[in-house]
Image: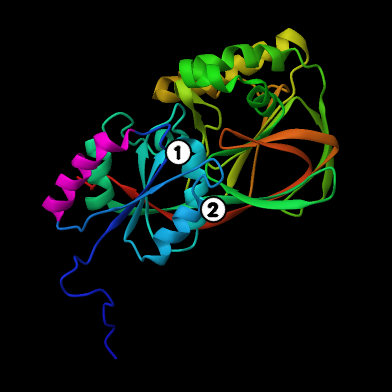
Amino acid sequence: MTAVDARPESQPSRRAAVIYNPVKLDADAVRPQLAAIEAEAGWGPALWLETTVDDPGAGQAAQALADEVDVVIAAGGDGTVRVVAEALRGSGVPLALLPSGTGNLLARNLELTLDDSEHSLRTALTGTDRPIDMAVIDIRGDDGTTSRHAYLVMAGLGLDAKMLANTDDDLKAKAGWLAYVKAIGLALRDKNQLRLRYNLDGRGNRSLRAHTIMVGNCGSLPANILLLPDAAVDDGEFDIVVLRPEGFFGWVQIMTKIFWENGVLRRTTAGRRLMGLTKEVRALNYLKGKELVVSLSRAEQIQLDGDSFGEARAFKTWVDPLSLIVRMPPEG
């Protein structure tokens, strides 16, 4: 039996939904751009759905799926992208990105255009599809309750989570990533270590003391910082970095690894040869796997894709391989 399109013949067969954060995106400026591209590409008028404080994107994504749109365009910061992607996971409906925040972490890692809305919208309607991995996490709080979330870029405890908890939201809105400078200073002065037990891919429990632990589906951060150099969005695994500095010299080792080796040497053939002569340092360790279970001696701040998710006493995170389709620029 031949499938029949339920849409009326007079209605164009393809339509997008734009889920946007009104604080991040001037929708009135973008609507004419999208309308022109729709007319050129033969698409119908998009469904425009505004996020709210109470619903940052999940309900809007559910509505877009119910309306059987052909692509969902997420226009906002990393939080908007994460929430919309979580709702689209496993649906088969592509996610397109219209970068509109300060971080734009997924767009940076996919090397998408960050400051050309027309190019991003054209990609959404005429680009190619790329399946990528997502990570899922169950977070258990001190009260024993568990919540499940998905993330695209990184989950972290320690420095990055404390930094986010200390960040002034008003200053971030005005100054972007400069707002994190003060927060980083406060976090670095925190002498408390994470004390945890972890089990990676069922290999058995191990104990660890660390300043920071980050689990990444992608490797790059803003300012072109390559934190996880071997991370790939479609390899079915995530990469883990553990920071264990002991005093000032330990932080120097970490900064040398991240900014010099990852940021400079790794980018050239000669530099990679030099890296082969350097030794691993105790202050920074890399792991790789598909499932990680962590229990902590006390509740600690945790972040997902740059948003604080309160405190975690334990968590379990795993990779959901190739579960999200992302719209990329046309090949060639």
* Pointer 2 residue: 236
Residue 36 painted magenta: yes
Quadrant of the rendering where the N terminus is positioned: bottom left
Q: Residues within 10 Å of mark 2 (few under 14, many from 20)?
A: some
The residue most toward the bottom is 1
Asked where in the image residue 332 lies, by quadrant, the reply is top left
SS for callout 1: helix
Name the residue type under label 2: Gly
Q: Amino acid at mark 1?
A: Leu
Q: Does residue 71 appear left or right of residue 154 in this picture? A: left
**Residue ID at (28%, 48%):** 124
Callouts 1 and 2 close, C-beta under 8 Å: no
| Residue 92: percent from left, percent from top | 41, 63
What kind of secondary structure does the magenta stretch mostly adopt?
A: helix
Q: Which residue is mark 1?
A: 106
Q: Which residues are magenta?
A: 26-41
Residue 226 place in picture, x, y as percent? 50, 27
Closest to the camera, between mark 1 and mark 2, is 1
